[in-house]
Amino acid sequence: MSVLNINAIYRTTEGEGIHIGTPQVFVRFQGCTIGCVNCDSKETWDFSGHLKTMNEVLEAVEKESVIVSESGVKRRIQRVSITGGDPFHPKHESSVLELSRILKSKGYFVNVEAAGTRIVDQIFDIIDFVSFDVKTPSTGVKTSEKLLQRLIDQYASKSQIKSVITDQKDFEYIYDLFFRLGQPQNIPWVLTPCYEPHEEFPKERFVAILKWNEEFGSPFRVIGQQHKWIHGPSELNV
Ligand code: SF4
């Protein structure tokens, strides 16, 4: 029986990226070694503890996916997002593959939020969608250009690229990368204005990114993190 390292399992509405506004159950894996400077979920870095069996995880997903209205009507959410931490860390990989297979056999739409340091080819045969991070200079982490090119060449139809933008240097870095990669049009590339837990809503940053995107020919989709506007930037599991 597999044992999974899990931070939390909860239902909420997707707050960012192209599936924004879609209710789903999140399975958040515990453990990440990437170390982004502006990470908004540092509580997921540590690999110790939080162990659950596959059955416990599946039961929790089933429980969270059922909603009973005030009048007693039962409805189900058939979407799961596997996130982290880093769900494609080698320590999580086999659990994520197994969980994805089981969820697909139960009819769920399955999305994985990938940190962008690895491509796990098998996952694309199993699940519906991968969100792939491309790191910016403000994160202190670099995404391999070769890896990104491979994602675009092989898996664009099942993916989005997401980049957190803190300042103009981040924007110009991503634009230069987009240009070097031949301005790919076959994959949505989302810019997420950075909104750190200690900040007030960064309106100026947001407006500046919208403006830069227009001035550079609108190659990206600028999508904020609406869960942070609604619940506050440091609220967990929302
Ligand atoms: S990959 Fe995600 S969880 Fe890991 S450090 Fe970066 S932002 Fe945080």
Image: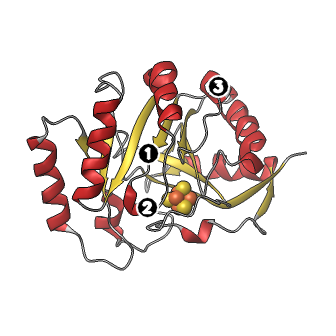
Q: Is residue 69 above or below residue 22?
A: below
- Residue that appears at 42% across and 74% down: 234
Count residues near mark 2 (Cα–Cα under 10 Å), then give few for <14, some for 14-19, many for 20+: some
Residue 84 location in percent, x, y? 59, 55
Q: Residue 115 or 104: which is nearer the viewer?
A: 115
Q: Which residue, given by chain and number where applicable, does mark 1 sit on?
A: 134
Task: Report whether 22 appears left or right of 170.
Answer: right
Q: Please provide percent x and percent y for residue 85.
A: 60, 58
Q: Nearer the viewer, mark 2 or mark 3?
A: 2
Tell me the number on the disc at residue 126: 3
In this rendering, which labeled residue sits more in front, label 3 or label 1?
1
Q: Amino acid at mark 2?
A: Thr
Instruction: Confirm whether residue 223 shows in the render.
Output: no
Q: Is mark 3 within 8 Å of ligand 1?
A: no
Q: Is the CB of mark 2 within 8 Å of ligand 1?
A: yes
The kind of residue on which mark 1 rests is: Val
Rendered location of residue 159, percent (x, y)? 45, 30
Does residue 140 appear left or right of residue 219 in this picture?
A: right
Q: Earlier in the sequence, mark 2 or mark 3?
A: 3
Question: Residue flagged by tag 3: what amino acid is it?
Answer: Ile
